[in-house]
Image (spheres, coloured by chain):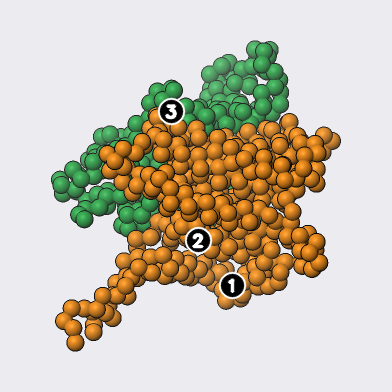
Chain colours: A orange, B green
Amino acid sequence: MSLSPTRVRLDWVVPVLLPVVNLAVALLLSAVVVVLIGESPGRALRTLASGAFGDAESVGYTLYYATNFVFTGLAVAVAFHGGLFNIGAEGQAYIGGLCVALLCLGVGSWPTVLVVAVAIVIAAVGGAAWAFVPAWLQAHRGSHVVITTIMFNFIASSLMTYLLVNVLIKPGQQSPETREFEPSTWLPQLHDVVRWLGWEIGRSPLNLAFVFSLIAGLLVWFYLWHTRWGYELRAFGHNATAAVYAGISPASTVVTAMAISGALAGLMSLNEVMGVQHRLLLNMPGGAGFVGIAVALMGRNHPVGIVVAAILFGALYQGGSELSFDMPKLTRDMVVVIQGLIILVCGALEHALRSPVEALLRRPARAE
Amino acid sequence: MIADAFLIVTLLAAATVRGAAPLILAALGGLFAERSGVVDIGLEGKMLTAAFAAAATAAVTGSVWAGLAAGIAASVLFALMHGFACVTHHGNQVVSGMALNITVSGLTVVLGYAWFREGGQTPLLAPGARFGPVDLPGASALAPLPVIGSIYREVISGHNLLVYVAAAAVPIVAWLVYRTRFGLRLRAVGESPGAVDTAGVSVAATRYMALVGSGILCGLAGAYLSTAHHASFIRDMSAGKGYLALAALIFGQWRPLPTLGACLLFAFADAVQLRLQGTPLPLVGVVPVQLIQAIPYVLTVCLLAGVVGRAVAPRAIGVPYVKER
């Protein structure tokens, strides 16, 4: 019989329980939409799940989508740690894709290993370059990175449409896309690797870029929590004024963070351009830059959380394409609704849900 | 030759006015929100919601006014959600705006597809269920006059009602913001919410009012797209106009008249781009349409960079106001 109330350890609430509660609330709101149009939310969820994880092929597709989202999620998260909101991952990935495509179109018969190594560098440089201008402008001219990265998305989109329609288009073709690259520049896909080892699994676009995305996650984790630069970035993000007093240069921190963020976004194109399409298509990032915002918020800006959230979103995108086959009233745009609601609940309403959840957990302890 | 050039200029001016109207409405909506210190990236989403609600309601009821009311109501609802997240719960304003934009881009298609079964569109509106051209008095009387007649007929008269609403909104918003008590509080809340709070005025209430204002104007902008400019809702029909309006607001340095100028400039660029479409110009040759499309964004970045003028945002923008820690 102790007089003081038992202290409940709540360390696990924010990183583990809160995302689960957030996801549940977002799915509940989505269920309301599904009911509103006269379909069964339970059936929709089952269709989503079986479409995403039903067999090896679906899992392959899920992880292929997840690869894009790990890269863009990490991109948004690195910027977030520095207190910056990078809405421009979409444009940065697009420019990264341009660089990769130019490389793949240009190299004649380089060995694959060399092409991949150069492509990694060039995709990162392309994305970083597109993020550098907004970053430099924020650091030295005080223009806010949110607005400039939005503008740079539109500028990238105009630039790429121009290049694809007028310059890079395969001659004698209507649709604006480049010619197919030489097979020596393709990233190996999982089903080919598995067949080479003597097994057979369903064909899916899952490729080596997935492994790259996990390595990127590991490197981001090391950078953020085990290097001086990562520490400076986080300190700056927590309290810019204090960080400046501690001798951290705001300009170089902003530029470094945005460059790394852009580089990660640019790396997304490895998966899409070299791993799957083997050519550059119009609107190559396909909204993955915006999914990255949801992934980073839901994964609470930690690489482990981001990988989990990215797989969840990969499952939504893959399962979503099954929705329209099975349930005639639903379209795959439902996935976009869920994505938006997750950003709303995990991001904007973060504080709204956090305190009630913590209060609810404290209450039984007080009653003792 | 001169007659041809005159005709082209007149048509360009008319197209500019039509293209500028939704930008003006949305940008003025954003002006309310941003001058009160709340970042309004959700202009795009609110326009899209309103476009869908207006077209859907007008299609079902056959009344353009019911459509307009529904569009405004839907847009205000989303503005209030933005307020709930950012003002009441001190959430991140940019995140909230993006969340609304993304949710709406999916939701309008999902609902449209389920309700109307036309692949995400709404049914085509009958002429009575949309805003038709309004002939201003004297358009036919002035018509015989050589220059003034055709300018009056093509550029000033003959637009739909919402174009004139947009034109009237500029002085009204300017008067509200600069000449009324509400406007003074609005601007003060955006610069120094602590001082306003000390004076006994509720920061939250003022910001909510500003957001409702933004909702109403974005509702008009959305209804313009689907029930005046077009005759149905088409998926993603706002197509970045909300972001363009935001750019115009920044380019206009958060002031009504310069914002009007920016909207006209951006709409003019778009009208020129539609007109050119690969026609070679004297001296420069064929100008790529994408280059002209990118002009508004490049200009805005240049302005933000301080290359042309200087954009100074409301001081408290983006910062949730927390009364006491």
Chain letter behind tag 3: B
Q: Chain of mark 2?
A: A
Q: Nearer the viewer, residue B69 or B182?
A: B182
The image quadrant that residue B281 belongs to is: top right
Foreground: disc 2 or disc 1: 2
Q: Specify few, some or many for label 2: CA neighbours under 10 Å numbering under 14, 14-19, or 20 or more.
A: some
Horizontal placement of A275 versus B137: left or right? right
Task: Let me know if marks 1 and 3 both belong to one chain.
Answer: no
Disc 3: CA contacts within 10 A as few (<14), some (14-19) or many (>=20): many
Real-space CA distance between mark 1 and mark 3, rounded to the nearest whole angstrom: 47 Å
Q: Which residue is mark 3?
A: B305
Q: Is residue B76 visible?
A: no
Task: Single out the residue that lies furthest toward the right.
Answer: A172
* Mark 1 element type: helix
Residue B47 locus on image (x, y percent) = 49, 47
Q: Between residue B178 and residue B169, name the one nearer to us.
A: B178
